[in-house]
Image (cartoon, rainbow, N blue to C red):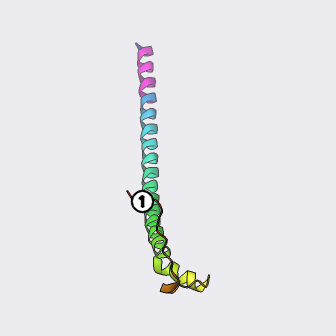
Amino acid sequence: MLRTHFILIAVLLASAIALVSAQHRSRTLHTQLEREHAHMRVLETEHGQLQIEQGTLAAHARIAALAETRLHMKTPARDGIIVIESAVPSP
């Protein structure tokens, strides 16, 4: 009978220690998850800002201005434009 009590007490202590360990692990993982969610929100904000910046940098007017200033390109006069018709008929 005494031996059974010791076995039950040992099982009870092992179970209690396992429970505390599992709760601690759960809290640790939850904290880590919250940190990752916060990091994800920061990255989403940065991604949105980068998309806006990319749209601004790729705007037609900006590209045209850079072509004129850096590459010294100019739009040709109307009489300097030649239109060549395609030899392949359109479907």
Q: Residue furthest left?
A: 91
Q: Position of residue 2 (x, y in %)?
A: 42, 15
Please provide percent x and percent y for residue 27.
Answer: 42, 46
The structure residue drawn at horizontal position 45% and vertical position 58%, both measured from the top left corner, is 40
Q: Where is residue 34, by image quadrant?
A: bottom left
Task: Tell me the kind of residue under disc 1.
Answer: Pro
Residue at screen point 43% across, 62% down: 44
Query: Does 14 lie within the magenta span?
Result: no
Q: Residue furthest top?
A: 1
Q: Is residue 69 left or right of residue 43?
A: right
User: In front here: 54 or 18?
Assistant: 54
Image point (62%, 81%), residue name: 71
Instruction: Work out whether 80 lies above or below 46.
Output: below
Residue 78: x, y in percent? 48, 85
Give the extent of the magenta segment.
Answer: 3-13
At 44% from the left edge and 50% from the top edge, which residue is drawn?
33
Q: Mark 1: give few (<14), some (14-19) or many (20+) Cα within 10 Å.
A: few
- The residue pinned by badge 1 equals 89
Element marked by disc 1: loop
Q: Residue furthest right?
A: 71
Q: Position of residue 4 (x, y in %)?
A: 42, 15
- Count of numbered tags: 1
Q: Quadrant of the N terminus?
A: top left
Q: Is residue 12 magenta?
A: yes
User: Who is closer to the viewer here, 74 or 19?
Assistant: 74
Name the foreground residue: 35 vs 53: 53
By secondary structure, the bulk of the magenta-drawn segment is best described as helix
Q: Quadrant of the C terminus?
A: bottom left
Position of 80 relative to 11 (above/below): below
